Amino acid sequence: MALISNEEINAIRASANIVSIIGSYIPLTQRGKNYLCVCPFHDDHSPSMSVSEEKQIYKCFSCGATGNVFTFVSEYENIPFIEAVAKVAEKCGMKLSDSTYKSNVSQTFKEEHEIMELSQKFFQNNLRTNAGVEALNYLKKRGLTDEIVKEFGIGLSLDSNDALMTLLTKKSYDNKKLLDIGLINNVSGKMYDMFSRRITFPLWDKDGNIVGFSARIYRDEKNVSKYMNSRESKLFKKGETLYNYHNAKDYAKREKAIIVVEGFMDAIRISNIGIKNVVALQGTAMTEQQISLLKKLRVKVILCLDNDNAGLLATVNNGEELVKHDVETFVIRLSGQKDPDEYILANGNEAFVKNVETPMTFFEFKMNYLKQNKNLENVEDLSTYINDVLKSLSASNDEILRELTLNKLSKDYDLSLDMLKNKLNGLSPVESTRSVSEPIKEKTKKDGYTIGMEKILYFMMNGEQYIKEYQCKLGFFAEPIYREIANEIVYFYEENKAITVADFITYIVTKNEIKGKVMEIVNESVNDDVTMEAMDDYIKAVMKIITKNEIKRLKNLQKSELDIYKKMKIAEQIRELKKEDV
Ligand SMILES: [Zn+2]
């Protein structure tokens, strides 16, 4: 990866105003010299995030999120730090010195990505030639607009069996590599283009790199499967991607929701009617990685899977997994047609939009699902149903949901609320008492010594004079993590001949051992008035405690010392320390 120097990163940070950058994502209101907004990093209902223009730092009072303009963009957009630097530079109209810098292309598979890009251009171009007329007509007939064809990079693999292979070998890419990434096929020793005679749809990884293709027939062909997909390769790992994620994530953040469908055609169809916050699983079961991608968006997830038994079961299972991961989950169940693609074709855009606007909560869906095949007039069925509902409710951490559901069950079936409550409590796992929206961070009370050290470290991040004061009056912290942070501050200052909190944060983002602590310190102190007087007060307080501890240690030593001369020497030391300590 191209390297950007620290000086350049700091210069970008200095010319970016954190208030306008965060303001470009979330509305901010000015409160005194700071700005407030709803925190995008936890389920925030009242503005908990404060942005300091003076310090160029943000902090959340509730979940503890803290950082500078780069960490914000990196976290918000769910992109690597260095990519966030590039993005901020772009937003400020600055150009990075390294013009070849393209951060989201993994260098590990540079050549593989080049081959994919080249193949993609070739396929896309084919669709615009005479050979592509029939395929393009087919797409038009299916109601896909020109913009969508472009947006989703739809192309055509020609009728010839080796058009792509010829092109790529001419560019001296070797066949082994083409086989590896699934662009060509080996049939009894003879090589062929993998996707001949098919319309091609590129598949991307989460960052938007093409990693494979899906291809479908467009003529009436017998005895061939409708779709053909790239096989899993070192480039293409189906379970690690969500189709269209790189395009949909910004829309999802804007809409505060992401729609999840099964097939990529569903995603394309839904985008075609202007709903862009949609991704496809390319299957039915959600993997851990897919859940983690969805969770990172911090928006609600709307499951809109196929209208068949597999889709129904997948909705139950995926929904449960999402809820377990504290993702706010909703469900749309379409009726009549097989999938969203066909539903929209048959019922029109508006019918689908209406569904999107009124999704049911996952729990509502689950309650209906549990009713299936049961006659609730029948006591036995009713009892099974109530037990199923309570069991599924016990998996939820949402207190409000629990309360509402119990009330509803009690009312609907004329059951005692206390009985239901007792039963639910009996089922509940012990750890599930925390409400989902509650911030995860628990603050432990800090003693004066810890507070003192942390304040001193914070002050040191604010300028040379505080570093000098520390070096001159303290020079050392006994606790390893604080010593480490102090050393890093001093080192940073000596390297850069200047220090600000915001630049120091850039420096420590890769230092995992101290990063968390530094962010915590900044979070707790960013609104402090930084003055030398306050610094000296903290130093005095810390020194007092250090002296006290030292006296305690010496007294213990004195007790166990047998040599009378040494004992006297220790007493002398204690007297000296006590003198200092006034
Ligand atoms: Zn927060």
Image (spheres, rainbow, N blue to C red):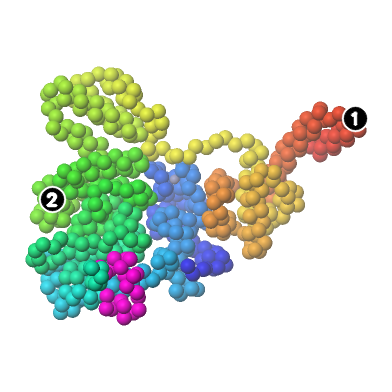
Label 2, ligand 1: CB separation under 8 Å: no
Which tag, 2 or 1, sits closer to the chain's start?
A: 2
Along the line of sight, which residue is nearer the eye, 525 or 433? 433
| CA separation in Å, label 2 and label 1 | 94 Å
Label 1, ligand 1: CB separation under 8 Å: no
Q: Quadrant of the C terminus?
A: top right
The residue that mark 1 highlights is: 564
Q: Residue at x 28, y 29 (%)?
A: 391
Q: Secondary structure at mark 2?
A: loop
Q: Residue at x 18, y 79 (%)?
A: 129
Left or right side of 377 for 491: right
Q: Is residue 416 above or below residue 158?
A: above
Indicate the quadrant where residue 111 lies.
bottom left
Number of numbered discs visible in the structure rendering: 2
Q: Residue furthest bottom?
A: 170
Crowding around mark 1 (Cα neighbors within 10 Å: few <14, some 14 to 19, many 20+) is few
Q: Is residue 533 visible?
A: no
Q: Residue furthest front?
A: 188
Asked whether 326 falls inside the magenta stretch, the response is no
Q: Residue at x 18, y 61 (%)?
A: 227
Rendered location of residue 339, percent (x, y)? 16, 52
The residue that mark 2 highlights is: 338
Rendered location of residue 573, percent (x, y)? 85, 37
Residue extent of the magenta highlight: 165-185
Q: Amino acid at mark 2?
A: Lys
Where ligand 1 lies, by image quadrant?
top left
Q: Secondary structure at mark 1?
A: helix
Left or right side of 55 for 30: left
Along the line of sight, which residue is nearer the eye, 60 or 230? 230
Indicate the quadrant where residue 21 lies.
bottom left
